[in-house]
Amino acid sequence: MKKFLKGLAALILLLLIAGFLYVQLIAVPGQDAKMNPVTDHAPYPVSETAQALHNQLYIADLHADNLLWRRDSTKRQSRGHVDLPRLRDGGVELQVFSAVTKSPRGLNFDGNDADAPDDITLLAKAQLWPLRTWNSIYERAAYQAQRLQKIEANPNNKLVIIRRASDLNQTDDILAGLLLTEGAHPLEGKIENIKRLYDEGYRAMGLQHFFDNELGGSLHGRSQAGLTDFGRQAVLEMRRQGIIIDVAHSSRQTVRDVLALTPDPIFISHGGTISHCPRTANRNLPDDILLEIAARGGIIGIGYFDGAICDISPKGIAKAIIDAVKLLGEDAVALGSDFDGTVTTSLDTSELAAITHELLALGMTEDTIRKVMGENARRFFAENLPQ
Ligand SMILES: [Zn+2]
């Protein structure tokens, strides 16, 4: 009997180990690959002229959720959209790394409950994030910043986290990373957490993600409310500290309240225009709000995903950029891929020259291409980061 029990215990232990290894080595990477796919495609055309131009460009992208996934981003990966080698292949100089910290089950653009079960809790556990992140949204933001800090700490990785405007003046071989929270729920309702996140390296904060939070209404929440009293206080404190405000995912009223509260330029890290793609009315902000953001020196990053621009092909991305320039002017438009943001894209970050090619083929001037591919983003951050 004793022998039998011993055997049974060993068997159970073996099954537990096998289960754990299955989840860690197969299920977790598989889920990542499934959630961040690139459509099958032959190499996209890039003319010699386009490639030569692309090679000279300063390229900046305003939104990638790369830090959410358990991958070694210092090495080339066969899944997802972004890692350091592929950023270099794409010629990227500045990448905004956003931190997703809470995501309601059944995610949609039309209406999410703030208290729906949270998928990031599940992801944090499945990916074996530190225990402190399992029940704290603040800690999830802190942890994702620390992941980028760890990459920065090894000089071989040639990555610098942008903390002040002068950090933007890097030599060509250094990749600049800027930290953004996707929604300000990591504050957990505490103003003092703005300073703590600033100290972790965050220089931009989205106010909402897919649900209403302590600061105000989300574009995809239930209330469609504006800023709360706490939201007003938080926005003013962010500005006082030199944190730039991102209103991607904020409700129309929240954005109007922010524009009334502070004269400072704000941005949309990833999105598109409803006039370019009418069925994105619940994902993108109306043209009049975009025009006001642009009028005060703000920028909008054009996403590469269906919910933002309708046609995700490189030509479709180029067309969305061209329409945004027509609407908002050539100084207000930038790239905002949403790479690794649980979206399907037609390319990964190594293939950005395909966008330059299509912009050129559709008749955009070299000067304007320079601006939308990165100079607008560089100018915006140079003007609005702490000096
Ligand atoms: Zn997003």
Image: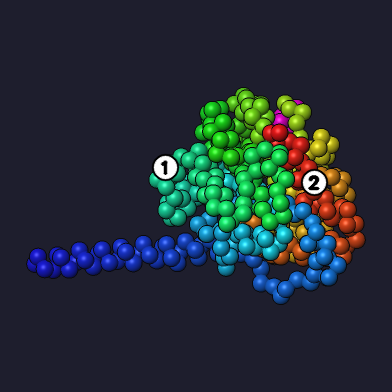
Which residue position holds label 1?
132
**Mark toward the start of the polypeptide (1 vs 2):** 1
Question: Residue 298: which quarter of the image?
Answer: top right
Q: What's under tag 2, amino acid-wise?
A: Asn
Rounded to the nearest angstrom, the CA distance separating label 1 from label 2 is: 38 Å
Callout 1 crowding tier (Cα within 10 Å): few <14, some 14–19, many ≥20 = few
Q: Residue furthest left?
A: 1
Q: Residue 66 placed where, x, y %? A: 58, 54
Whether residue 84 sits left or right of residue 61 in the image: it is left
Q: Based on the picture, tell me whether residue 203 belongs to the magenta stretch.
A: no
Q: Based on the picture, tell me whether residue 258 belongs to the magenta stretch.
A: yes
Per the image, label 1 sits on a secondary structure element best described as: helix
Residue at x-position 71% and y-position 31%: 258
Camera sees residue 270:
no
Q: Which residues are magenta?
A: 256-260
Which residue position holds label 2?
376
Whether residue 365 sits left or right of residue 245 in the image: it is right
